[in-house]
Image (spheres, rainbow, N blue to C red):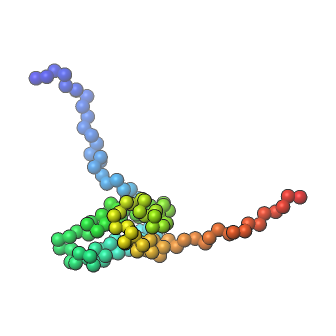
Amino acid sequence: MIGNHDNNYQPAPCGSNLPKWLLHALILHASQFRDALYEWHTETATGLFGMLNYWPTNLFLHKIILEDIVIFIDTNKIITLQDLQKKTNWYLCEQYGGQIILLIQCFFPPGPPPDLFVLTPLPP
């Protein structure tokens, strides 16, 4: 036997294989957006692959990317198609990303544009 083994060995924590996305309480619009996004995902994948007996929907858009989109929407980091491409790096973003952006705008409409002219009092 080798006498130089470490008696202070501690195993790695069991939670190290948990998914990377945060499972947190979303606001109501984000929760409804998540449901609509998953529904769009299933309908679009079914249209591409048929009855999905042999092809899972993850071939079209993986669940991790869907959850990332929901988290980025919750933190207002995806507004344009370029933001979606940069944040998710999804290979079909140019073809189907516009539909996701339209879905985002349905649930989170952009605010009014800022005023071009701001009235400021002149110094006396």
- Give the camera-side residue of 115 and 5: 115
Give the residue displayed 25% in from the left and 28% down from the top: 8
Viewport quadrant of the C terminus = bottom right
- The residue most toward the front is 94
From this view, report whether residue 106 is shown above or below residue 21: below
Give the residue displayed 26% in from the left and 76% down from the top: 48
Residue 15 place in picture, x, y as percent: 29, 47
Asked if one can make out residue 109 in the rendered structure from this viewpoint, the answer is yes
80 displayed left or right of 59: right
Residue 18 place in picture, x, y as percent: 30, 52
From this view, report whether residue 68 is shown above or below residue 41: above
- The residue most toward the top is 3
Tell how many labels: 0
- The residue most toward the right is 124
- Give the camera-side residue of 5 and 87: 87
52 displayed left or right of 68: left
Residue 49 place in picture, x, y as percent: 23, 75
Give the residue displayed 31% in from the left and 54% down from the top: 19
- Residue 70 figure quarter: bottom left
27 displayed left or right of 42: right
Asked if one can make out residue 74 in the rendered structure from this viewpoint, the answer is no
Give the residue displayed 20% in from the left and 70% down from the top: 55
Viewport quadrant of the N terminus = top left
Residue 73 place in picture, x, y as percent: 45, 64
- The residue most toward the left is 1
- Residue 86 figure quarter: bottom left
